[in-house]
Image (cartoon, helix red, strand yellow):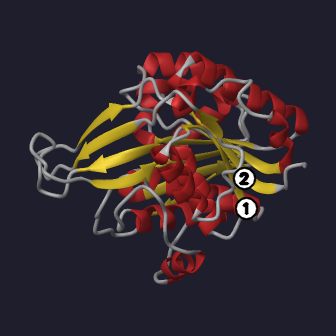
Amino acid sequence: MSASNVDLLTVGESMLRFSVPAGRLLADAPVFDVHVAGTESNVAVAVARMGFKSRWLSRLPDNVLGHRIADTIAGHGVDCSYVNWSDTERTGVYFIEFGASPRPTKVLYDRAPSAARNMDETTFDLSLVGNAKIIHLTGITVALSEGCSRLVETIVTRANDLKIPVVFDVNYRALLWSHKECRIKLEPLLSKVDTLIVSKRDLGPIFEIDGDAATAAKELNRQFGMPRIAITTGDQGGAGFEDGKTVLTPGYPVEMVDRIGAGDSFAAGVISGLLEGNFVRGLQYGVAMSALQLTTEGDLFRLTRKDVLQLMASESVGQLIR
């Protein structure tokens, strides 16, 4: 039976996150809070919560932990029916100890050799690319393994051939690769994506681009030619580039509960706007969704479109178009 059409198709690894309760140390924590975590599945869930159809591809162990991950993601309306199941591999996990100034937040990964690291261009029926309106991919998947890198390259090529837009989030992780390795691997892909998402803090170390977000967006467009660029600027909000113009969307005051997943919520907002044919609206969604995500525990966006719209309407959100 042929696959149904979806608004978003994304692929990547999801793990279990073990969080130390606030104020405790990883070294002696007696209990952990457990959450399903993974950039691409976070985005798929958030896009679904905004009222769109999303599909997530991954590889998981065929055991209780793998099914816990898939069931949790599917429970938020994401199509997980094309997950590739493994009889022999394991679930990736990571541990997080939340800091309080001046003590930093610490993350410890235990993700190799996870089932997802063995994904490659043969793992999935890539005709699924043709059933999506937008493809979402990240640098995290490229960094996992050579097979995962080939998978991303193949999906991008397939999407380009079918003229399906690709949204690519650099999503740099220092524990996976160096800034230099990241640039070398991603440069061949970036000229093939339609929308690039990147954090302002990564522009200098990876792309050697300095200056404010608006200037940086124009330089990224000059170097790689992607039509749209979305840059996260922390508590200042976000910046976008489209049709030669830059748009700044200010952030919201936030009382932060959990910093994980905010960037993924931003990406989901951008994608939601693109699905509605309005990139600037997507930036507004993204900044609002990112702020809301910071106020809840866990990686997954569990709020609704109504919550997002209420926040956006709660105060005047100005824009500066240059």
Is mark 1 in CB contact (under 8 Å) with mark 2? yes
Regarding mark 1 in the picture, which secondary structure is present there? loop
Which residue is found at the position 89% from the left and 38% from the top? 162
Question: In the rendered image, is residue 208 in sight?
Answer: no
Q: Which one is earlier in the sequence, the residue at label 1 or at label 2? A: 2
* Quarter of the image where one finds residue 31: bottom left
Which residue is found at the position 56% from the left and 38% from the top? 60
Q: Dot 1 surroundings within 10 Å: few (below 14), some, or many (20 or more)?
A: many
Which residue is found at the position 74% from the left and 24% from the top? 122
User: Pointer 2: what residue?
Assistant: 8
Drawn side of residue 35 relative to residue 131, left or right? left
Return the x and y of residue 221 as percentages of the image width and height. 66, 35
The amino acid at mark 2 is: Leu
Return the x and y of residue 175 as percentages of the image width and height. 36, 27
In the rendered view, tell whether residue 181 sits above or below residue 206: above
| Residue toward you, 127 or 303 | 127
Which residue is found at the position 33% from the left and 33% from the top? 109
Drawn side of residue 212 relative to residue 217, left or right? left
| Residue toward you, 72 or 44 | 72
Regarding mark 2 in the picture, which secondary structure is present there? strand
The C terminus - image quarter: bottom right
Return the x and y of residue 250 as percentages of the image width and height. 46, 63
Question: In the rendered image, is residue 256 in sight?
Answer: yes
Q: Dot 2 surroundings within 10 Å: few (below 14), some, or many (20 or more)?
A: many
In the rendered view, tell whether residue 143 sits above or below residue 81: above
The amino acid at mark 1 is: Lys
User: Pointer 1: what residue?
Assistant: 53
